[in-house]
Amino acid sequence: MLKDERGFRAAIMYDKNEALAAYKKRTYDARPLNDHRFDHYLMLI
């Protein structure tokens, strides 16, 4: 059991951060990476 509000808030933030880290680990980002070589190639065309 939590003794005070500060401990309660800390527990909530810890749980939130753990949940966000797990979510980011499971998701796939389909956006293209910023690759300076590709940008250079487009300038040559």
Image (cartoon, rainbow, N blue to C red):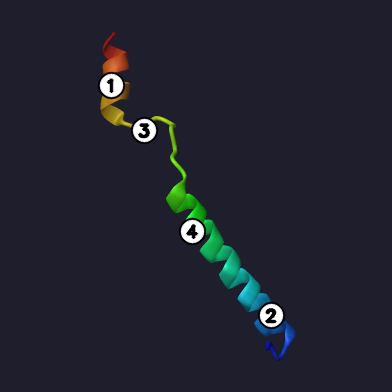
- Check if mark 3's residue and mark 4's residue have beta carbons within 8 Å: no
Q: Residue 6, how many percent across, how many down?
A: 69, 83
Measured as percent of width and height from the top left, residue 5 is found at 74, 83
Q: Which residue is mark 2?
A: 8
Residue found 68% across the figure and 76% down from its top: 9
Residue at the disc numbered 1 = 40
| Badge nearest the viewer, 3 or 1 | 3
Can you say whether 13 is above or below 37 in the image? below
Label 1 residue SS: helix
The residue at 57%/71% (across/down) is: 14
- When the figure is inspected, residue 8 is found, relative to residue 37, above or below; the finding is below
Of badges 1 and 4, the one in the foreground is 4
Q: First in sequence: mark 1 or mark 4?
A: 4
Tag 3: amino acid: Asn
Q: Kindly identify which residue carries mark 4.
A: 21
Please tell me which of labels 3 and 1 falls first in the chain. 3
Question: For the point 26% across and 17% down, which residue is it?
Answer: 41
Quadrant including the N terminus: bottom right
For mark 4, does the 10 Å Cα neighbourhood hold few (<14), some (14 to 19), or many (20 or more) residues? few
Quarter of the image for residue 37 reads top left
First in residue order: circle 4 vs circle 2 = 2
| Rendering coords of residue 42 (x, y %) | 31, 15
Tell which circle, 2 or 3, labels the residue nearer the N-terminal end.
Answer: 2
Residue that appears at 36% across and 33% down: 34
Q: Which residue is label 3 attached to?
A: 34
Q: Nearer the viewer, mark 2 or mark 3?
A: 2
Q: CA distance from mark 3 to mark 4?
A: 23 Å
